[in-house]
Amino acid sequence: MERQISTEVGRIDILAEDTEGVRVVIEVKVGEAKDSAVGQIARYIGWFTKTERKPSRGILIAGSFPEGVRYSAAAIPGLTLLAYRVQFTFEKIAG
């Protein structure tokens, strides 16, 4: 797994490989995903598929995905959307 990989088509947050040897492009967005994030990861998936001459896939991680973004993502084979949740708890130690 590699982080912040520069390519001819942009900088990828995380580049991994699954158990079957398929490249996995992972993009992480703060807060709500925008349409541009789907276009961005589609560009990376397409570039790897073309340069390596085998399919690659992607994972887009964000806090939420509006309905329009979900429709866009559904049109891209091999793209998975994952929503994260962050929760903080505080514990007083002293004072």
Image (cartoon, rainbow, N blue to C red):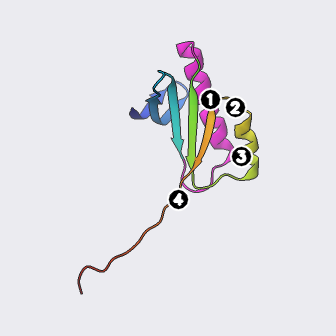
Mark 1 near mark 4, Cβ–Cβ under 8 Å? no
Mark 3 near mark 4, Cβ–Cβ under 8 Å? no
Q: Is residue 22 left or right of residue 32?
A: left
Q: Which residue is mark 4?
A: 85
Please give the range of residues in magenta: 29-54
Kind of residue indicated by mark 3: Val
* Residue 43, disc: 1
Q: Quadrant of the C terminus?
A: bottom left
- Residue visible at 57% across and 33% down in the picture: 58
Q: Is residue 83 left or right of residue 94?
A: right
Towards the viewer: 10 or 53: 53
- Residue visible at 56% across and 27% down in the picture: 9
Which residue is the extreme one toward the left?
94
- Residue visible at 58% across and 55% down in the picture: 63
72 drawn magenta:
no
Q: Which residue is mark 2?
A: 76
* Residue 69, disc: 3
